[in-house]
Image (cartoon, coloured by chain):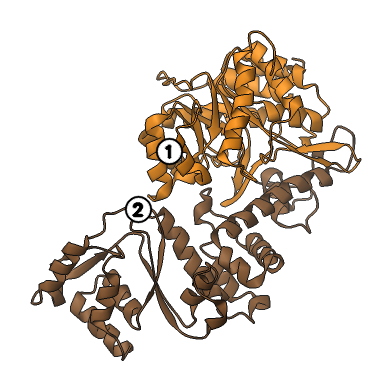
Amino acid sequence: MHGMEHLSLQQTPALGISTTSAPLQSFRLPIGVGVGLKAQHYEAVLARSPAADFFEIHAENYMGAGGPPHHYLSRIREAYPLSVHGVGLSIGAEADIDEAHLDRLAALLQRYQPASFSEHLAWSSHGGACFNDLLPVPYDLNTLLRVCTHIDRVQERLQRRMLLENPATYVEFANNTLSEPEFIAEVQRRTGCGLLLDVTNVFVSCTNHHKDPQAYIDALPLSPVGEIHLAGFAADRDAAGVPLLIDAHGSRVADTVRDLYRYALERTGPAATLIEWDNDIPSFERLIEEAQRARQCLTSATGGVCA
Amino acid sequence: MFDIGDRGRLRMTGQAEFAAALLDAERPCPAGLTAWNGSDPGTRFAVYRNNVVTSLIEALTDSFPVTRELVGNAFFRAMAHAFIASTPPRSPILAVYGEAFPDFIDHFEPAGSVPYLADLARLELHRVSAYHAADAQPLAEEGFRQALARAAALPGARLRLHPSAAVQCSSYAVFSLWAAHQGTLGIGTVDPYQAEEVLIVRPHLEVLVILLRSGGGRFLQQLGDGVPFGESALTASEEAPGFDLGGVLADLIGTGAIVAFDF
């Protein structure tokens, strides 16, 4: 990890060490394949009791006072384990964590007692404006200390270990002093958070930045991985005409990503896996079919054969 | 974050610069971004710009479908884009984004030839709010009739409206325009310049949009403000000469808009 030399970690031992003293509650998603819960599928889920091992929601879609979202989620929660996935906490922001939003998250977790809470290594708001996108952070010492402080605060307030998701990125920062997996490993070591390994994001980012996705996975600590994400990507081109992949969540999981998923599973062991499909949302049957394809990889993970 | 640059000028750095360039396509790509192949990082930064604008336009499209149909997709997206640039979301909860969109439409000059557009957007905003509003058990029909039968006490009673209930009194036929786009009313029969009073409420899972008789909207607004029953009816009859209290009450039974009568 040559990048660590730039950080002079030995000279700054106290700055980034987690201050969380009370042991954090640990929860675990079941080993299996879940799908993202979409309002379009509420009735189908309740009517058909599909073979999903868990459901995942975007936390911010369930922060209203009442109505159909809570009505259906309450019923689905009675029958399935739940993962709450935040998309708006802006952990990578320069500003402090939004305590009002953290309160809303705490209330949501209190109400639904999910098996997992995860958020992104990214920022999405600045100066009071929210951008509804996961924006990149530079991988340097300042950012590392800030992200660790934010994760410490989140875990302290929520009284549970969170999973941190690796981002899909389209640019790099000139002042990066760490690689992305090095940065994530250091955040994990300092905060004790778990990891959400988004295999599609690994593939997308490594393609976009000309890195080896298998080496990326090898560079991550894998025992803290509590969940894996799989999604479809879209393909564009950069100014030089080389492929620029976009984390679009609007199609099936590509074969290349499934191969990388299989590679990851060989190293993580069987892991809770989620199919994310948030745009051009398919029929519920098609979504479950996609989950079934991942389940075949998962069940044969020890044999190493991806169906 | 702001830094004092080496010439002593205030200079945006980091996320401030990134954020400003997301919403303003005229701004250059933020400094300090690179690509492995030395290609122009502006093309790559444009992915973020596009993600932000497109996802927020999609959010507005989801919340304001009839507004979009009234002006067409291209016009709506251009109007939404202008709104996003001037009024980005202030909350990570996207469902509440668009609260300021109807007022923006009011002042959006290119939409000036569709004077009822902003009010139609207000109706759709009420629908979104009702969808996410707190739940409450509506007063059952039997309880409603019993309360109305207490003739002596009724004028002093205060009514509690359902938390999802909203009333819109528009100078335009917003209900008819909206209904025509649900396929429940022929658009050819709609005179958009006919004033209409509309109740939007979600007593259970489904959001209802209900056309009220003349004065019914004013009556419900008064009740919602905590004005007693008798005084609310009086105000409505003064402002809407044809106000038919019995008819309005008959219309309200079964809508679930009333949660309780407090005598």
Residue B260 in the image, given as x and y percentages of width and height: 21, 62
Residue A77 in the image, given as x and y percentages of width and height: 40, 33
Q: Are marks 1 and 2 in contact (CB under 8 Å)?
A: no
Q: Quadrant of the C terminus of chain A?
A: top right
The residue where tag 2 is placed is B134
Foreground residue, B39 or B221? B221
Chain with colour orange in the figure: A
Q: Is residue B225 visible?
A: no
Residue at x 64%, y 18% (from the top left corner): A297
Left of B6 or right of it: where is B174? left
Foreground residue, B71 or A297? A297
Residue at x 50%, y 27% (from the top left corner): A51
Check residue B81 in the rendering and tell me which mark sits there, or answer none. Answer: none
Chain with colour brown in the figure: B
Name the outermost residue toward the bottom.
Answer: B241
The amino acid beneath tag 2 is Ala
Residue A76, by quadrant, is top left
The residue where tag 1 is placed is A46
The amino acid beneath tag 1 is Leu
Which chain does the residue under circle 1 lie in?
A
State the CA–CA distance, disc 1 to disc 2: 22 Å
Label 1 vs label 2, nearer the camera? 1
